[in-house]
Amino acid sequence: MTPGQALFVPGEWRSLANCLGLSPRECGIVRAVFDGDSERRTAERLGLSPHTVHTYLWRIYRKLHVQSREELLVRVFAEFRSLPKRAARHRAL
């Protein structure tokens, strides 16, 4: 299980992407950041060039008004905390 999978269940990732205005591809890039992947590793996982991943990250940073991976993580966690709470989370702890 990757760190991104351990933190948020798939439905939470979808909710986060929707609230943040991220496309499915952008959400995949953000998940890779949560997994600690480099741009090169993200490119391999998603079948993209490293340059394309870099461009996506730059656009995500602009969209979310952040300037680094660390700020991106904080921004996503902050958005998660503002999501409506569900009665139960469907994941094994």
Image (tube, rainbow, N blue to C red):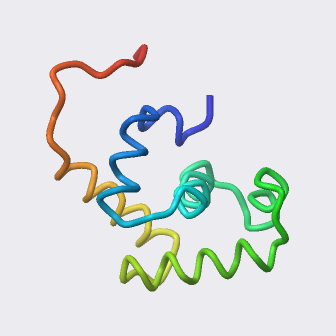
**Going 34% across and 64% down the picture, which residue do you hit?**
20
Q: Quadrant of residue 52?
A: bottom right
- Hey, which residue is sitting farthest top in the picture? 92
**In the image, residue 23 above or below residue 93:** below
Q: Quadrant of residue 72?
A: bottom left
At 14% across and 41% down in the image, what residue appears?
Answer: 84
Number of numbered markers: 0
Looking at the image, residue 10 sits to the left or right of residue 24; the answer is left
Residue at point 53%, 42% (across, down): 4
Give residue 66's position: percent from left, percent from top. Answer: 40, 80
Query: In the rendered image of this protein, does residue 91 appear above or below residue 7?
Result: above
Where does the image place residue 33, in percent across and percent down from the top left?
58, 58
Picture quarter with the N terminus:
top right
Horizontal side of residue 68 vs 43, given as left or right: left
The C terminus sits in image quarter: top left
Q: Nearer the viewer, residue 74 or 58?
A: 58
Q: Residue at x 46, y 69 (%)?
A: 70
Q: Is residue 77 left or right of residue 31?
A: left
Q: Position of residue 62 (x, y in %)?
A: 45, 85
Q: Position of residue 12 (x, y in %)?
A: 36, 39
Vertically, is 77 above or below 89?
Answer: below
